[in-house]
Amino acid sequence: MTENIQKLSDDLSKRGKLIEAGWTSLRAAVIRPDAPPIVVERMRKAFYSGAWHLFLCMTACERNPELCSDDEMRRKVTAQLVTVIGEELDEFRREIDLENREVEGHG
């Protein structure tokens, strides 16, 4: 990531724009600067859709109090969500790392 993109991402994060910061970093990392606007917009929608889904998962207790009867249950459910989400993202990262090694000829 270039220094300018990192600075922009940091600035967005400090202003509470965490999703936009992630999108900005992803866009810089994987979308060509000359990509057609429709590609950029569809990628942005896909990125934000994933963020929205994750937000819904993380706020399930608040939106559905019957799922979490008390604070202890809420902490357990949240901890479990963090664990399974982390495991799934780790698996995805391993897939990406493997693909990158294969593309680079190291696989």
Image (cartoon, rainbow, N blue to C red):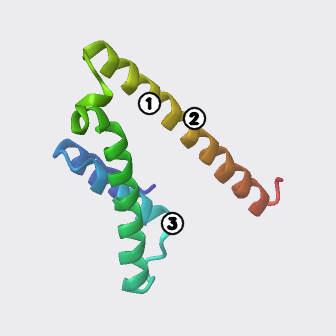
In space, the residues marked 3 and 1 are separated at their CA atoms by 26 Å
- Please indicate whether residue 23 sits to the left or right of residue 34 in the image: left
Mark 2 or mark 1: name the one nearer the start of the chain: 1
Disc 2, SS: helix
Q: Position of residue 80 (x, y in %)?
A: 46, 25
Q: Amino acid at mark 2?
A: Glu
- Please indicate whether residue 9 sits to the left or right of residue 105 in the image: left
Mark number displayed over residue 87:
2
Q: Which residue is denoted by mark 3 in the rendering?
A: 30
Instruction: Evaluate whether residue 3 shows in this view.
Output: no
Mark 3 or mark 1: name the one nearer the start of the chain: 3
Residue visible at 27% across and 47% down in the picture: 18
Q: Mark 3 or mark 1, which is nearer to you?
A: 1
Residue visible at 48% across and 76% down in the picture: 32
Which residue is at the front of the view, 47 or 37?
47
Q: Position of residue 45 (x, y in %)?
A: 36, 69
Q: Amino acid at mark 1?
A: Val
Quarter residue 2 falls in: bottom left
Residue visible at 48% across and 71% down in the picture: 31
Q: How many marks?
A: 3
Above or below, 83 against 71 in this view is below
Q: Residues within 10 Å of mark 2 (few under 14, many from 20)?
A: few
